[in-house]
Amino acid sequence: MEGGASIGGFPGFEPPDDDERYKRKVEKSTATGEEVNTWVKEINNFLRQIANKNPGVTLEKILEKQGLTSEQITSFSNALKDVHLNASTRVGYGVQESTAKTLEELMRLLGVGTW
Amino acid sequence: MVKQFGFRPFHRMHDGILIHITLDEWPADVPLPEDIKLLETDDGVVHPFWRIVLEPNRTIEAIGGIFQMNCSRDATSKKFEHVMQNVGWKSNGMLFQEERRTTIRYTHSIDDAYVEVSLLQSKDLETTRVTISRTLKHPYIPPVAEEEPVEANVEPALEEVAK
């Protein structure tokens, strides 16, 4: 789980090896607001599936069950917090308020602090 | 100094409002290293935000921004440590280090405010993306509803007025 390998360092969303343009955007953090919006929507879908499969269970517990170390879990949560801040910063500039809201709701549902 | 904002655009969020601010309006109590600049993306500079979240028992005030430093993560980290300590913020070893990311949480002795600084180093080690948020939580006690006057008490008063 290498921090920074994807936009916002969010694990599981690394650009494909053959997509140089995407890789450059990630590396230089130059993604547009619309691109961030699309990417946050994908993360929302990913988190929603996790939340639906594990009702009432925190992300920490779910990842513990998956065998992740406490460092890896903290890394995941920090990446998620970065994503949240990135989305909040771009609200109105490509990121839709509803997309940012869904992310916040899912983070709260999974026990990951936003503030 | 009180800044005269005047009317300005804001975003109505589901739980409050969000206002984008300029670098000049960034709060002085969260000092920035001199050579820091706002992150520039393919659609322009990303401005920091000031967000007010309204919850039943508290108001949350959050400031957030994404910046860039043209130096390594370690150099950036040292610069932050220096400027933050100068105004009373302490990291107290609250630091999380990964291969390319360092997250530092600063707290302040005078209240429960905290600042989180996340440093993400580029692969060439030449630049560091800096994500900063400052969170303040203000307790809120909703005002007690005013008691409605009992009708029986009102009528004699009205009669008095009529006389």
Image (cartoon, rainbow, N blue to C red):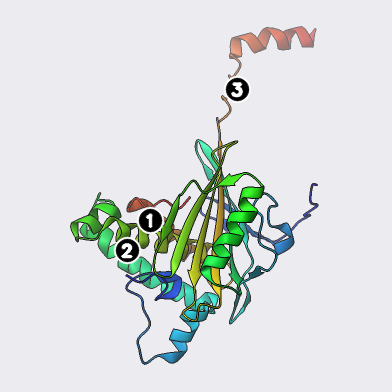
Foreground of the two, B94 or B15: B94
Residue placed most toward the observer, B66 or B42: B66
The chain that hosts pointer 3 is: B
Please report the residue visible at 59 percent of the width from the left and 19 percent of the height from the top.
B148
Q: Nearer the viewer, mark 3 or mark 2?
A: 2
B150 above or below A68?
A: above
Residue A38 lies, in percent from the top left, at: 44, 75
**Could you tell me if residue B24 is visible in this image?**
yes
Residue plotted at (57% across, 37% down): B109
Q: Check disc 2 and give the amino acid type.
A: Leu
Q: Which residue is mark 2?
A: A47
Dot 3 amino acid type: Glu
* Residue carrying label 1: A107
Marks 2 and 1: in contact by CB < 8 Å?
yes
Where's the C terminus of chain B, which quadrant? top right
Badge 1 crowding class, 10 Å Cα cut-off, few under 14, some 14 to 19, many 20 or more, is many
Which three-letter amino acid code belongs to the residue tagged 1?
Met
Residue depicted at 30% across the width and 61% down the height: A72
Q: Which residue is mark 3?
A: B146
Name the subunit of mark 2. A
Labels in figure, total: 3
